[in-house]
Image: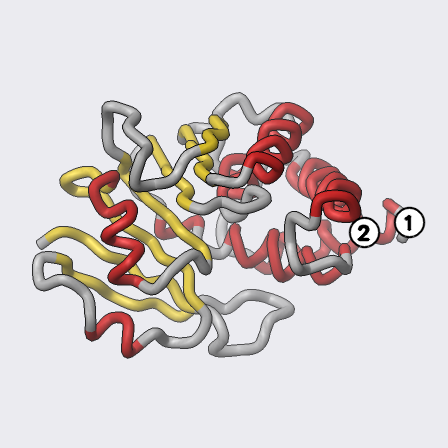
Amino acid sequence: MLRDDLAAEVRSALPMLPGALPEDAADRLTVLIEELVRWNRRYNLTAIRDPMAMIAGHLLDSLIVRPYLDGARVLDVGTGAGFPGLPLALAEPGRSFTLLDGNNKRIQFVRHAAGLLGLANVAAVRARAEDYAPGYRFGTVIARAVAPLPRLLGMAGHHVGEDGVFAALKGRYPAEETDELPANWAYSVAPLSVPGLESGSRHVVLMRRK
């Protein structure tokens, strides 16, 4: 695929999202997709292999949750190849992002991509959420298609600050999972309209301590 075609698609897709982005966001996000495609051939970092499908499936699906971020520090649990953390860090240079994953190749890619994109607000850490001990908590803990909600809270709920939020990105409305949430956590569910993806196929579950 020609880089110009990919860049044009990214450039036309970003205005469909709420909120302004840095002026060079489209160019940098195009570089992110190109690098992911290149690394994916060798390391199989993501199941999405078509660069055009990555625009909706990775970039837009990450950036759509931007309005729900709280606080100055964000923890992306099970970041995989850096989603949603890398696009969000690019969109929110005033916040610091820690991207956490137990897979060494994925974290190597995240470090490489963050350096390539000039994201000084990104730290990539190879660790399990249960074992990670930064010495502080986060305004937002975010996870995208990592585990069922009760398990997510067990893994990483302790990283959420007192007034912070755990934002879990899900597919269809996870009614069975919300029914099993601990009594000391309140939650709300918001539908997400991701351009290029099926309507009703994305939700964010926002969990806060009561």
Depth order, front residue of 178/196 = 178
Picture coordinates of residue 42 (x, y %)? 77, 44
Looking at this view, is 17 or 33 the one in front? Answer: 33
Name the residue located 28 percent from the left edge and 45 percent from the top edge.
156
User: Dot 1, crowdedness within 10 Å: few (<14), some or many (≥20)?
Assistant: few
Residue 6: numbered disc: 2
In this rendering, position of residue 47 left or right of residue 102: right
Q: Residue at x 56, y 35 (%)?
A: 104
Q: Amino acid at mark 1?
A: Leu
In the figure, residue 137 lies in which quadrant? top left
Type of residue at label 2? Leu
Q: Which mark is residue 2?
A: 1
Mark 1 falls on what kind of element? Answer: loop
Task: Decide if residue 173 is on the left or right side of residue 31.
Answer: left
Which residue is most to the right? 2
Helix, strand, or loop for circle 2?
helix
